[in-house]
Image (tube, rainbow, N blue to C red):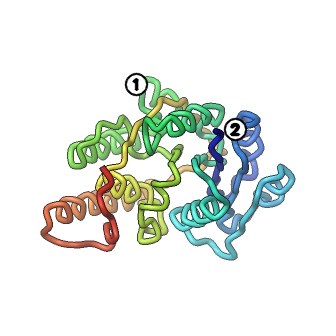
């Protein structure tokens, strides 16, 4: 029986790359593609409508995390059983999305991540700045150590979730900023969801969106803070809203 697959795209000023990203998604994979525009200043919305996407527009810029909250709310409302997050900036290879969906459909994993870090040479050769590579490696090792996971990368924006994941994780308690991504996976680890990853090629280019150095630092500290909360919560020393209503699944 076919599972309903919805692709969600959190967009901000993605007018130059959106069409290429959408056209790389294999025909027949997605029952719907939802684009949530976070008050872009370019022609992202008009291009999305021309492409036949379901478009939701924030009347003001709310942030990357807030954008994802709207994406997931709408996907659940529209009956998605598998939700695939693809950035419309053409950084990730969207043609691989069927592999993500199939692994979740076969109940091998609840969450699949697209890992950019297969080898150091390949990762840096794609154009990833050295400081981002080093911080990615440091945080990923720390996150694996603390949560007991063995993921090759925690900081990818290419992800797929089962419906159960999105219905269980209290993601509305998460940040409206970039650290939303880290908080979501830390919550998933706390709950015991099964996470895995697949290697994906990555493109760093002028048109693709990229978090600035300053925001990267804020993101890194926010991730470490969330890990510290994970430790204290699991040890029953303190309780945090991030894990409120979280009951272990496995």
Residue 57 tag number = none
Q: Residue at x 76, y 58 (%)?
A: 54
Where disc 2 sits, the SS reads loop
* Residue occupying the far front of the picture: 1
Please state if 16 lies on the left or on the right of 224 as rendered.
right
Residue 119 tag number = 1
Q: Nearer the viewer, residue 156 or 136?
A: 156
Decide: is 207 above or below 165: above
Decide: is 81 above or below 92: below
* Residue occupying the far bottom of the picture: 59
Q: Residue at x 83, y 59 (%)?
A: 46
Decide: is 166 above or below 66: above
Q: Nearer the viewer, residue 113 or 110?
A: 110
Q: Position of residue 45 (x, y in %)?
A: 78, 60
CA distance for labels 2 and 1 = 29 Å
Q: Residue at x 31, y 43 (%)?
A: 140
Q: Quadrant of residue 67?
A: bottom right
Q: Residue at x 43, y 68 (%)?
A: 175
According to the image, label 2 marks what residue?
29
Q: Position of residue 208 (x, y in %)?
A: 62, 45
Q: Pointer 1: residues within 10 angstroms few (<14), some, or many (20+)? A: few
Q: Position of residue 35 (x, y in %)?
A: 70, 57
Marks 2 and 1, the one that precedes in the sequence? 2
Position of the N terminus by quadrant: top right
Q: Position of residue 242 (x, y in %)?
A: 34, 68
Where disc 1 sits, the SS reads loop
Mark 2 or 1, which is nearer the eye? 2
């Amino acid at each position: 029986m076919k599972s309903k697959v919805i692709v969600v795209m959190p967009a901000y000023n993605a007018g130059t790359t959106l069409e290429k990203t959408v056209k790389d998604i294999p025909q027949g994979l997605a029952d719907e593609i939802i684009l949530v525009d976070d008050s872009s200043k370019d022609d992202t919305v008009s291009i999305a409508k021309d492409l036949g996407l379901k478009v939701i527009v924030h009347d003001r810029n709310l942030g990357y995390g807030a954008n994802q909250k709207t994406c997931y709310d709408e996907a659940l409302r529209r009956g998605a059983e598998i939700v695939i997050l693809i950035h419309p900036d053409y950084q990730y290879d969207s043609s691989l999305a069927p592999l993500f969906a199939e692994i979740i459909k076969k109940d091998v994993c609840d969450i699949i991540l697209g890992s950019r870090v297969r080898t150091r040479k390949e990762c840096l050769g794609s154009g990833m700045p050295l400081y981002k590579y080093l911080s990615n490696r440091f945080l990923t090792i720390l996150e694996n150590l603390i949560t007991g996971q063995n993921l090759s990368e925690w900081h990818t924006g290419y992800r797929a979730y089962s419906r159960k994941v999105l219905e269980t994780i209290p993601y509305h308690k998460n940040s409206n900023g970039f650290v939303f991504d880290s908080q979501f996976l830390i919550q998933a680890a706390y709950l015991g969801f099964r996470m895995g990853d697949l290697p994906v090629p990555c493109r760093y280019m002028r048109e693709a969106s990229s978090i600035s150095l300053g925001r990267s630092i804020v993101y890194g500290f926010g991730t470490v803070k969330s890990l510290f909360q994970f430790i204290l919560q699991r040890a029953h020393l303190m309780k945090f809203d991030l894990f409120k209503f979280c009951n272990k699944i496995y």
